[in-house]
Amino acid sequence: MASAPFEVKGKSVFVAGHRGMVGGALVRRLVELLTVTRSEVDLRDQAAVNKWFAAKCPQVVLLAAAKVGGIIASNTLRAKVYENLVIAANVTHSAHVNNTEKLMFLGSSCIYPKLASQPLREDSILTGPLEPTNEPYVIAKIAGIKMIEAYRNQYGSDFINVMPTNLYGPGDNYHPEYSHVVAALIRRFLEAKVSGARNVAVWGTGTPRREFLYVDDLADACVHLMKTYSSDELVNIGTGEDSTIAEFARVVAATVGYNGEISFDRSRSDGTPLKLLDVSRLASLGWRARTSLADGIRSAYRAYLSESKHTTLLVVVRSEEMKQSEAARLQFWNVLWSL
């Protein structure tokens, strides 16, 4: 499964999707990088992508570019499947024709069947029906996986597939509707703390179990696998540990300092009931996650507080109340000072 060590240092490395949460973590982990913004090269444009590859000749490619979101985004923005399909196809093909030495495609733990046996083994892909709410997104990821396998099998390309679990950390998307569960809960508990709300409703029943990986741990695992792994078999990247959404929500609330009630909105979909990755293959390759959930959530929260967009968010939360009285303004700034 593993090949002779592949040296990343000193190579020209292209991180596709460097402005996203995963791409940003890879940028923090690596040096001597090639990056490109959409205004410079639209990864949905095959001719533009191939022209850029021909000019820059990246030796290593980490394909992290994709349109992503939480359960609401996946279920309502279903036609975004087009963008993810063409990005994966364009980058993979251009890497092939321009002699990229090694490419990694980052998939998702969502690729596994909704009711697959737990923990999720790499060979359970395509063994059963998918979770309906994110099926288009998953189909695009599976197409990318199979494309990597095809180029590897037909041309001998050193292209590999990795499947990260649920991720969180700096650079996450905190959209009120389209974010993933970690970012959504950090934002909602903080808003509740600032506004003095007595209750926060968590979507779903709180019973589904999820595994969460700090994004900088993912970046470290990716670099480790780029150096040490070469096979057409998938590699799961996770912690090997999970918790219920209810348990996780309490961890986030405690980290943020929210002391109110937590309820559950059962009108919202739970999604897949269980999703824990089997990480035994990754462990056999010499890598394990280092960041505990509590430490990771604290780091993610600090990162959120440091983002400029967050300051704007807090002002919006209390803008009307701040207009009403000096006491409200004083309370608002006291809460900010204590964060």
Image (cartoon, rainbow, N blue to C red):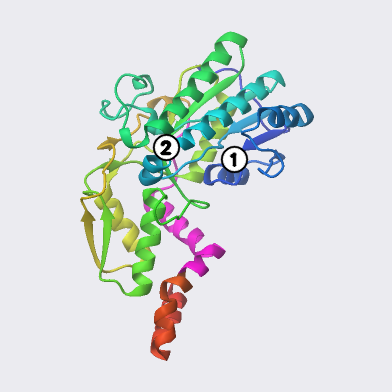
- Give the quarter of the image for residue 282: top left
Res 213 quadrant in image: top left
In the image, residue 20 sits, relative to residue 4, either above or below, namely below
Q: Looking at the rendering, in which quadrant would you find the C terminus?
A: bottom left
Q: Secondary structure at mark 2?
A: helix
Q: Inspect this view and state whether residue 58 appears.
A: no
Query: Residue 208's spot in the image, x, y percent?
Result: 25, 42
- The image quarter containing residue 184 is bottom left
Image disc number at residue 311: none
Classify 10 Å Cα crowding around label 2: few (below 14), some (14-19), many (20 and above). Answer: some
| Distance (Cα) linking label 1 and label 2 | 20 Å
What residue span does the magenta drawing correspond to?
Answer: 286-313
Element under disc 1: loop
Q: Which residue is mark 2?
A: 78
Say whether residue 287 is magenta: yes
Q: Earlier in the sequence, mark 1 or mark 2?
A: 1
Residue 261: x and y, percent?
Answer: 23, 65
**Residue for point 30% across, 55% down:** 249
Q: Is residue 79 left or right of residue 64?
A: left
Q: Nearer the viewer, residue 87 or 280?
A: 87
- The residue that appears at 54% across and 39% down in the rendered structure is 220
Q: What's under tag 2, amino acid-wise?
A: Arg
- Asked if 68 appears above or below 310 in the picture, the reply is above
x and y percentages locating residue 98 in the rendered image: 72, 21
Query: What label does residue 17 carry, if any?
Result: 1
**Is 58 placed above or below 264 here?**
above
Please tell me how crowded label 1 is: few (under 14), some (14-19), or many (20+) other residues with Cα within 10 Å: many
In magenta stretch: residue 310: yes
Residue 12 image point, x, y percent: 72, 33
Q: Amino acid at mark 1?
A: Gly
Q: Residue at x 26, y 36 (%)?
A: 274
The answer to whether 115 appears left or right of 257 in the picture is left
